[in-house]
Image (cartoon, rainbow, N blue to C red):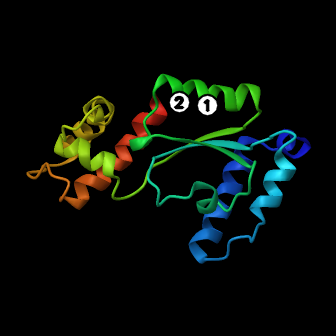
Amino acid sequence: KAQQDSLTPHEVFERLKAGNSRFVAGEVTLRDHTEQVRKAAGGQFPKAVILSCLDSRIPVEDVFDCGIGDIFVARVAGNIANIDIIASMEFACKAAGAKLVLVLGHGLCGAVKGAIDKVELGHLPRLFEKIEPAVERALGDASVADRSSDNASLVQSVVEHNVDLTVEN
């Protein structure tokens, strides 16, 4: 708790960037997660809340070289902010003391690709409606003749716009 209280949002952000640099370099801290879970059982003092995509290839704690209890992670396909996610982030900050909210997008996002292609499957179109404004922004950036998830530059542009719009929301 003392460490959490002493940190500023900027310091938390710098720690996350440093952790990500260690991850990219393959120099992550070795941790005993079982022991960390036992130690954290009495309370939690996360430094940040990270909104990430549902994607199973993005182990958020590892990507930022964080241990158990260091961050809250909210996951939803396309890292969109709905009322439940926003309420959870409010809890993380106001009740649990997290100092920073970070929205994490990623390349080759399946939800973004589905929104671009207007996939019709179950409830997914309702989720894709929340990503559509990012698709429209990306299409408006430049002349894009190919609205297709095969268009890698469009996908990347939508990923970036989607993060920006999620932050705005």
Q: Which residue is mark 1?
A: 89
- Compare residues 3 and 124 and report the one nearer the observer: 124
The answer to which image quadrant residue 61 occupies is: bottom right
Q: Nearer the viewer, residue 145 or 49?
A: 49
Image point (18%, 59%), residue name:
150
**Viewer-proximal residue, 87 or 22?**
87
Residue located beneath label 2 in the image = 85
Is 23 displayed left or right of 85 in the figure? right
In the picture, the disc for residue 158 is none
Residue 137 percent coordinates (x, y): 26, 39
Residue 158 visible from this viewpoint: no
Q: Quadrant of residue 6?
A: top right
Please name the amino acid that badge 2 sits on: Ile
Work out which quarter of the rendered image holds the N terminus and state it.
Answer: top right
Residue 66 horizontal/vertical position (percent): 70, 58
On the image, the x and y values in percent for residue 164 come to 42, 40
What element does badge 2 sit on? helix
Three-letter code for the amino acid on which mark 1 is drawn: Met
Query: Percent x, y for residue 112?
Result: 30, 46
Residue 127 visible in rendering: yes
What is the CA distance from the residue labelled 2 to the residue labelled 1?
A: 6 Å
